[in-house]
Image (cartoon, rainbow, N blue to C red):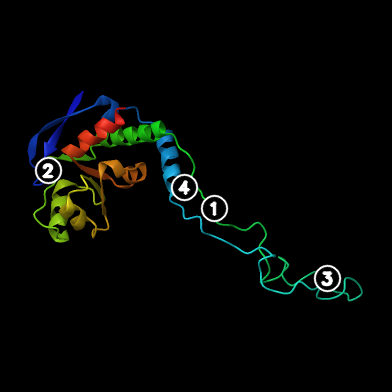
Amino acid sequence: MATAAVFTLQNKEAGEIELLDTVFAAPVNRHLMWEAVNHYLACGRAGTASTKTRGEVAGSGRKLWKQKGTGRARVGDIRTPKWRGGGIVHGPKPRDFSYAFPKKKRRGALRSALSMKLNDGQIKIIDKMELESHKTKAFAQVIGSLSEHPRALIVDSLENRNLMLASRNLPTTKYSSPSALNIHDLLKYEALIISAEAVKELQEVLSK
């Protein structure tokens, strides 16, 4: 079992925390992370794209001219897909893009991402994320002192209202609770700034 330094919001060391090897020193499975990201993106698709078939397009169904004898190409009704404004052949229809993905694989992908970030020095553990104000300006200064990376994912309890309000106006940061942490956000943001309590919650869930 390894240990990691714990810092204050002023970027001063405040102690150490034990990290489980099964969570923060797991083998980095890049293919598993790729699968988990694809699943996350697929579940987020709206699936609302829709086109009209020739049976749904407005227009008469009468034959425009006789089949033979005119010298023109034969044609049926005006809604034929060959014509502009006609129906669409094999076009998209509303559908659900989500699919089942095993819970063990999803947790395994999170363990791989956390282990990779710890190896790369992209995880900063904070003792307590207690902000005096919900002002974004003060929070931006705190993030600037804690991380060298401009893009940061902040993980703490949902009860931390000041942190949630202060972080949502910064386009380069995102706030998340431990239960809502996903593989896409972990890989998208370079830095992971997480509270000590959130680390304990994650270890409790991901060690199973």
Q: Could you tell which of marks 3 and 4 lies nearer the N-terminus?
A: 4
Q: CA distance from mark 2 to mark 4?
A: 35 Å
Residue at the extreme top of the image, as rendered: 1
Looking at the image, is mark 1 or mark 4 earlier in the sequence?
Answer: 4
Mark 2 or 1: the one toward you: 1
Label 2: which secondary element? loop
What amino acid is at disc 2? Lys
Q: Tell me the residue that label 1 is attached to.
A: 95
Secondary element at image label 1: loop
User: What separation in Å lies between label 3 and label 2 (alpha carbons)?
Assistant: 77 Å
Residue behind mark 3? 73
Establish if 1 lies above or below 98.
above
Residue 78: percent from left, percent from top = 74, 72
Residue 151 position (above or below residue 55): above
Q: CA distance from mark 3 to mark 1?
A: 37 Å
Report the side of 180 relative to 125 (left or right): right
